[in-house]
Amino acid sequence: MRILIIEDEKPIADYIVRLCRSILGDKIQSIRTLHTLEQAKAYLIESQIDLCLLDLNLNGENGFELLKSAVSGPFHTIIISAHTEQAIEAFHHGVLDFIPKPFDEERLRIAFERYFDRRKNRDIATRYFSARIGNQHKIILIDDIDYFKSAGNYVEAHLKNGKTELLNKTMDRLGQILPPRFKRIHRSCFVDLSQVYSYRHAGGGKYKIITRSGDSLPLSRQTYKELHDLLNV
Amino acid sequence: MSEKVKSPQATIIVLFLLQLSIGVSLSYSISNSATTDQEPYEAFSFDLHSNEVKNVRGWRYHFGDHPEWAQLNYNDSLWMKLPYSPGVQDKTDGIRWYRAPIFLFGEQDDYDVLALYFRLLGISYEVYWDGELLDHNGHVSQDPSQEIPGGIRKIVKLKREFTTPGRHLLAIRLSRHFKGQTYRIFSTQFGYFSGIQSNIHTHSNLLYWEGGLFLLASLFTLALYLGSHKRSYLLFAVFCFLNLCYTAYGILQYEIDMNTQSFDILLLLFHIGKVLLYSTLNIFFILHFDIPYKHVHVCSSIIVTLVIRFVLGSNLIALSTLYSLALLLYATRYYPSESILSMLGVSIFSFSDIAFLQNIFPGTYLVAGELLFLFCIIFAISKKIRKQDQLHEEAIMKTARMETELLKRHIQPHFIMNTLLSIVSWLSENPKKAALLIHSLANEFRVIHEISSKKEIPLQREIALCESHLRLMGFRKDATYTLTTRNLCQEEAVPPMIFHTLIENALTHAYEPGENGSFTLICEKNKKKIQYTLQNDGSRLKKLKEKSAEQIDEGMGMKYVRARLQESYPHKCQIRYGFKDGNWEVIIVISK
């Protein structure tokens, strides 16, 4: 596991490193501490990480800019901040957890558990996604998305207006931060259940879902059963 | 917004123009009547049935002295006509005679007698009716040393047998060596005795009313002055008191049988008083509405009043309120409702004054006008007091907010939480440092608690607080921060947490993590100002160098500093910042 810690107060950064090592032990492949936004931006362009531990107020600058950039990456972000009033907005942007300062080892352990747990266990739903287009970040409202479809290392977000945006996320990580109305109907697909028009057996052991916009999506046998039970109760 | 502003301004301009046009038309009509005398020269006739009191007209006069001139049948057709118009004054001395034929018709009243009422008639005179001497006032003489000035008022009753229907002659033999201002022949009135009496009562009653009105207003505004020590109230009290004197002068005419000489002195006082009266009214508005260039306006308003007095005369002196009206027009920008009320009041006051003196209004209307005027002004005063109360409350609220802001700045969660987390992190690594950090934090809170409610604290204290904060932040950021002071005038007082806030700002924005920092506080003092310069050597701000100072957004901290300095040194404080010799510096200049 590759961890990046962005924290401007060195003693605290050291403390977080110590706690990470104590909780994760051998699971850590690499751990890196950075103190400023500029360093972090530069580092994220060059390096691959799995988890970013981010302080939202670095040297008096607003870390939301970095947050938007971070959540567009393929890694998870956990916020460590004393500004608890920013927690809800952070969750809206799709962070995995928000740890209020001061915290102890136990609280950090819970955050790591969330990282490893594939189930959705967040109280506040994500509202926005951040898609990277060149050097910029485009904010996509999650309500505008009909379904997500995997596309190699990326995920395609299919919007209600027929457009497609490419997200730098894995399907598993997406599953951890999506609101509950998105169901994973197939290894390669999340769909907003309210956008489902029909589902049917397509023959040859294959199942399909037709969305309101007329797109046809693959449906796993397992989910087909679940849907069937859900609707025929 | 713009519509809201438009309508009161329109009202004001209309009011102003109205006042101006009234003033101009009145003065025009007066100058007109004084220069051309187109009135038919008619003999004075009186209906014996009527109960009215009339001014005697149709006078002819001649200089010299002859007993025959008192006779009914003397031919005076070659004598000069005395034009019937107010304001005609005869400044020559020596004996002269006045004759006015009087035609009586109808039937005499059985119970009442006719009478002549001489008011303010010059000096010493003898009254003849159909050649017979009826009465005299003082002693008439060709020799100035022999002349004895008489009283200012005289009622001469006419026996019933004298006032039979038909032609009669009223003749007055008069000498005037004494150069008073009281000589006015037109105010000789003729009518039944009871009518004259009731006229006098009505007039004096009105004067008592007027006096009471101004006495009350004067005492009321004096009380306001004593309570608030605002000079404008005192001025209005003086203005009301002068009005009271003015009415008292009227009352004196009726209550005291005054000698013409002493009355003449009183009249001079009255003229001075009237100039004073209108000057105080103008000055009252200048002070009350905080008109800028006070002294200039006070002087020029007095000059305007004097010019109007001497050019247009005493009767039109109320036109000097045009000066107040112009100022009030200006004041509508800041106190719209108050100044409109005042303009209305002043317009009513000056209009009724002019109209009364020009005999357009009866006295009752004058008193009503004055009543309205006082109501308007006192209403405007009360509105302004209310506004000041509101401002005062806001100021108190602001100070309270400032205190809260100060506390909030330091008890804000992120400061405490980050510090606590630093303590936690030091606890395992270096418990001694953790303990020191706890002490620094405790010390800082203690000081902040002590100074939070103070408007100003000694500079020494502020510096101690800054040093404590630097120590604390040094532990947190794992760096060394120092504060050097130069030329410090320790006894100087500053609003709390000014430098503390600036240092806090610099620590957040100026330094890279782990970078050591040094601050310098320099104080320069001379007779005119104190200048504080706070420098830091942070490397991050140097990147800002390309940006000009205006482009830098001021955060909450800077706003706090500005608000606090503005509160302690209103309009006497300047803050500048920028680079100098590679250091970022904030300069605070407080002028004395």
Image: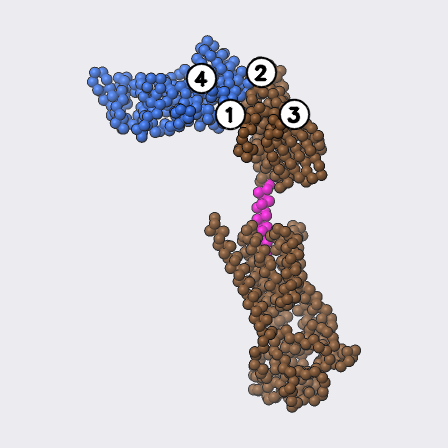
Which colour style is shown? by chain
Q: Which SS class for mark 2?
A: helix
Q: Amino acid at mark 2?
A: Leu
Give the Cα distance between marks 4 and 1. Answer: 23 Å
Q: Which numbered disc, 4 or 1, marks the residue that appears first in the sequence?
A: 4
Relative horizontal placement of residue B301, taking residue A90 as reference (left or right): right
Q: Is residue B17 above or below residue A3?
A: below
Rendered hue of chain B is: brown
Most prominent secondary structure in the magenta stretch? helix
Chain on which label 1 sits? A
Q: Which numbered disc, 2 or 3, marks the residue that appears first in the sequence?
A: 2
Looking at the rendered structure, which numbered label has been put on residue A57?
Answer: 1
Q: What is the x, y in percent for residue A231?
A: 26, 24
Looking at the rendered structure, which numbered label has been put on residue B427?
Answer: 2
Look at the image and give the residue range highlighted in magenta: B376-396
Looking at the rendered structure, which numbered label has been put on residue B483?
Answer: 3
- Res B160 visible: no
Chain on which label 4 sits? A
Q: Which SS class for mark 3?
A: strand
Tags 3 and 4 touching, CB below 8 Å: no
**Can you tell which of label 2 and label 1 is closer to the viewer?**
1
Queried whether the magenta region covers residue B393, the answer comes back as yes
Q: Amino acid at mark 3?
A: Leu
